[in-house]
Image (cartoon, coloured by chain):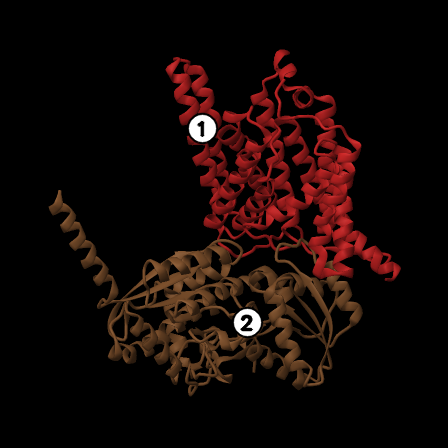
Chain colours: A red, B brown
Amino acid sequence: MSFNIALWLSQDAITNGAIYALLALALVAVYTVTRVIFVPQGDFISLAALSLATLQAGLVPGTVYLLIGGGLLITAIDGVAVLRKKKLKRFAAIALENIALPAVIAGAAVWSASRPEDILLQVAVTLAIVTPMGPMLYRLAFQPVANAPILVLLIIAVAVHYMLTGMALVFFGGEGVRTQLLPDISFQLGVLNITGQSLAVIITSLVLIVLLAILFGSTVYGKALRATALNRTGARLVGISSEFTGRLSFALAALIGAASGILVSPFTTIYYDTGFLISLKGFVGAIIGGMTNYPLAALGSLLVGFLESFSSFWASTFKESIVFTLIIPVLLWRSLTTHRVEEDEEP
Amino acid sequence: MKRTLLLSLAAAVAFATGAAARDNILVGVTLGATGPGASLGIHYKNAFQLIPRTLGGRPVEFIILEDKTDPTEAAKNARKLIGEEKVDAIMGSNSVPSTTQIAQIATEAKTPMIALAPVALPHEKLGWVFTTPQPVALMMGAVVEDMKKKGVKTVGYIGFSDSWGDLVLKALKKHAEPAGIKVLTDERYARADTSVTGQVIKLLSADPDAVVVGGSGTGGALPHIGLVERGYKKPIYHNHGTVNREFIKVGGKKVEGAIAPTGPLIVPEDLPADNEVKPVASDFTKRYEDKFGEGTRNAFGGYSYDGYLLLNAAVPAALEKAKPGTPEFRQALRDALEDAKNVVGTHGVYNMSPEDHTGLDERARVLVIVDDGKWRLKK
């Protein structure tokens, strides 16, 4: 292997690793705040990429109906409960959030479908469609059982994953799509051919990671998230709503998933079910971080990117096996060096 | 109390004998319009909306079950169709592993089967199984012939890391080696991969005269785009699993010039007027596109349709010997399928024999090329 080849492979590894890192951070955030191992993380990638491609084809994506349906369901559940207690103001707030907001987003989707050249608008609409699905999922699937053991939450997460995959197949069909975000620009840097797309991935990922760090480090919302992650009961005692932090972490996860989907869709083919495999690699990164350590999870994801890239050169037949086998030594090392804490027991 | 018992006993007896022989024909179908093979399975299933509900003049009922492109599920469906519904024939499925599972069950239960995807079993075990898709070797033979014409001496291979990737490579080697063409690389990738940079670099450093991609559907586009983006200018060949319009939609300008073997029904307009397959292929493609939209033509719906045409040709002979619903009828249907001669389908002309349960020849293949955003017959 020459130095040039190593350089090319590294470039590829960093681009992919950046995406895995974003996903790993989302997985860690959701896990620490809600104890949910968020299997459907990858489905947001597929939903976002397919929605964007549909908008670019001048059509309204089916995900809009999913959003409206979810909103109506939540209004029916929460609205009836507050109406019984005659809290009209509260009902208005719920209806505004769950009926009016999806309706506005649906309107924006219809508008943007008629403007196929306005890529920025399409990206914004795609983010607006997918991001609210996170909190909606939390409200419908996880909030009613927020205190259930981790295993129960995991099984629900798997069920949600299958539901979303099925929906994506219904809305978008079985064939893959690619999107066009930036014109095909590229420039030469030594032997490296750097494309605008790959640069966009790395820059966007870095910006998102910095924003996440700021959010967690120095805003009151981030402090609430961290407090819940550290001690749920304690956070509740000082007045932090665990329902609110749950929804916030799911919104973050959906936003990151959607952003990753938009970022990868120009340089690979995305199918209704491939987001899951991409997020699985982010998951390996998150495991390296012990599902709790953000910087380690990001570094782990980068390692996954490198492993994948170089093994696809040396032994492409065994590439997936090599990447996923990485979990075994990591888990061994983890279980030898850390104390086991019974996380299932609520104090 | 006694009377009720007697009545229900009588009913049970009547039902049991009724199930044994009937006037209409039952055909069980299992396909995966969801799961990893969904993009193919949807087309396979669509074709059943265009299939007439008579076989050899008799009314026929198709019981269509979903197997999620999962071999275990396909096996379960096959057992249900054969064991509970007592179907006269079974058709399925859209993936090699699923079809292989069904074939084993059909053979064991002595029920004739139309395999809609290649079966990974030796011919001796396929006594009851008749296959509509062209053998991979037949298709890759056309690819190698074209390479010979171009004077290609070395070829690089990149294919799916599954049984499809293996089948295409095996077929390629079978023809390439006698032709003196060396297969330099065996690179693998998965449909869900975000990048094939590593494999592409390896291919480029081997510098073959041509590359063969063993993917299917839009999955074939990823290595092709990767090769073109890195400046590979020599011919890139695909296989018959890749030919659909989504491949071009995904690949855009970068897949211009991609060459692939396929059945005649993809380009019926470009076929010469004296082509035997042309009328059947044109008719089916037209009806398919009228129903499912412009440009939806594909090879997979044609495999379902050809399965119907084969059964349609075989049923009259079987009806002379026995009544549907009986083991005698199933045996007669199998024998009639094996005797089927000159059945013109959408993909070619089927001539079955005890030695050949696919029965297709060179008339079942054409080479197509992506020309100005469309699959056209390669002249």
Indicate left or right for A310 with A25 as reference. right
Indicate left or right for B303 with B316 as reference. right
| Quadrant holding the C terminus of chain A | top right
Neighbourhood count class around disc 1 (C-alpha, 10 Å): few under 14, some 14–19, many 20 upward: many
Q: Quadrant of residue B256?
A: bottom right
The three-letter code of the residue at mark 2 reads His
Q: Please state the chain letter of the residue tagged with numbered disc 2 in the rendered image.
A: B
Front one among A250 and A181:
A250
Q: Residue at x 45, y 56 (%)?
A: B67
Q: Residue at x 50, y 31 (%)?
A: A141
* Residue A51 vertical position relative to residue B25 in the rendered view, above or below: above
Q: Position of residue B303 (x, y in %)?
A: 44, 70
The three-letter code of the residue at mark 1 reads Ile
Indicate left or right for B353 with A342 as reference. left
Residue A206 shows in this picture? no
Neighbourhood count class around disc 2 (C-alpha, 10 Å): few under 14, some 14–19, many 20 upward: many
Secondary structure state at the residue bearing disc 2: loop
To which residue does mark 2 refer? B240
| Alpha-carbon span between mark 1 and mark 2 | 47 Å
Residue A74: image tag: 1
Q: Quadrant of residue A138?
A: top right
Residue A233: image tag: none
Indicate left or right for B130 with A22 as reference. left
